[in-house]
Image (spheres, rainbow, N blue to C red):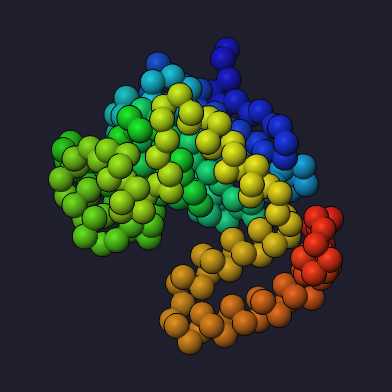
């Protein structure tokens, strides 16, 4: 049996590839469970500093597997499905390592949610994005959570209410993706970004990612109080002292992750 999720590690970068090309990498229960388990393993893997999520075949991810969903039309099955998906998306946000979505083809519904949940996203010029649940009588409510936190309200609502496909250029304008590159340069562009981030202190990356998402949910005063405490703790870390000394001495820092 072909693995539905592939992992390849190189240069402290783990690439997780959705591998259900015949189903346009639809997020079946099995694929979400595999992705959830791999992210849990990566969280404790000191050899991995950055994660890339990609897809095999013609699409990045076409959302949930509708055939699987309709095969078991019960409340319990639906609750289990969306609970697993919600746990997976939160695991991406809470992973102490940056996650980059490498997007080609389409990223629709839960696939768009996957892109919005990632810390960064690099898209091919021909990539397209949508939350088209409204077209089949199923509002994209769980994708809405990630989308509305990464994109402005008006742009999010337009995608959610119309279900229209959004081209990569527009996705960049509204902040859904960071970079748009030629199709044949997608992999190298994503790797270049991942390598740049992987060259930083892993401790600093973990501290910064966690702080970014936590402060975003606070009021302004609370956010500054929290961020000041984070900066203080960060300054006491060995890597912060090493980084400052290396800068002053005009040399490359030697990160230890402590």
Left or right relative to 104: residue 187: right
Can residue 239 be seen in this snapshot?
no
Question: Relative to 157, is 247 above or below?
Answer: below
Q: Quadrant of the C terminus?
A: bottom right
Q: Position of residue 43 (x, y in %)?
A: 68, 48
Query: Which picture quadrant has residue 16?
Result: top right
Query: Which picture quadrant has residue 253?
Result: bottom right
Q: Nearer the viewer, residue 155 or 191?
A: 191
Residue found farthest to the top: 1
Question: Relative to 18, is 194 above or below?
Answer: below
Query: Which picture quadrant has residue 247?
Result: bottom right
Q: Position of residue 237 (x, y in %)?
A: 80, 70
Q: Residue at x 84, y 66 (%)?
A: 249
Q: Residue at x 53, y 44 (%)?
A: 100
Can residue 100 be seen in this snapshot?
yes
| Label total for image | 0
Q: Nearer the viewer, residue 156 or 204?
A: 204
Q: Position of residue 250 (x, y in %)?
A: 80, 62
Q: Nearer the viewer, residue 128 or 63?
A: 128
Residue found farthest to the front: 250
Q: Position of residue 163 (x, y in %)?
A: 19, 42
Question: Relative to 228, is 129 above or below?
Answer: above
Q: Nearer the viewer, residue 8 or 172?
A: 172
Q: Residue at x 51, y 52 (%)?
A: 119
């Amino acid at each position: 049996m072909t693995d539905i999720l592939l992992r390849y590690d190189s240069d402290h970068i783990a690439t997780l590839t959705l591998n259900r090309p015949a189903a346009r990498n639809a997020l079946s229960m099995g694929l979400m469970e595999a992705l959830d388990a791999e992210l849990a393993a990566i969280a404790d893997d000191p050899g991995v500093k950055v994660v890339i999520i990609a897809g095999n075949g013609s699409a990045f991810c076409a959302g949930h597997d509708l055939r699987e969903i309709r095969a078991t039309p019960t409340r319990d099955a639906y609750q289990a499905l969306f609970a697993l998906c919600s746990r997976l998306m939160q695991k991406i946000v809470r992973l102490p390592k940056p996650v980059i979505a490498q997007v080609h083809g389409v990223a629709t519904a839960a696939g768009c949610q996957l892109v919005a949940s990632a810390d960064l996203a690099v898209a091919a010029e021909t990539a397209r994005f949508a939350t088209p649940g409204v077209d089949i009588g199923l509002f994209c409510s769980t994708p809405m959570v990630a989308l509305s936190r990464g994109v402005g309200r008006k742009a999010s609502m337009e995608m959610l209410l119309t279900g229209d496909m959004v081209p990569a250029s527009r996705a960049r304008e509204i902040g859904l993706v960071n970079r748009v590159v030629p199709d044949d340069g997608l992999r190298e562009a994503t790797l270049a970004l991942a390598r740049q981030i992987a060259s930083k202190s892993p401790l600093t990356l973990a501290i910064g990612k966690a702080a970014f998402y936590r402060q975003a949910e606070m009021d302004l005063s609370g956010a500054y109080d929290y961020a000041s405490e984070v900066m203080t703790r960060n300054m006491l870390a060995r890597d912060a002292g090493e980084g400052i000394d290396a800068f002053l001495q005009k040399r490359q820092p030697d990160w230890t992750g402590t």
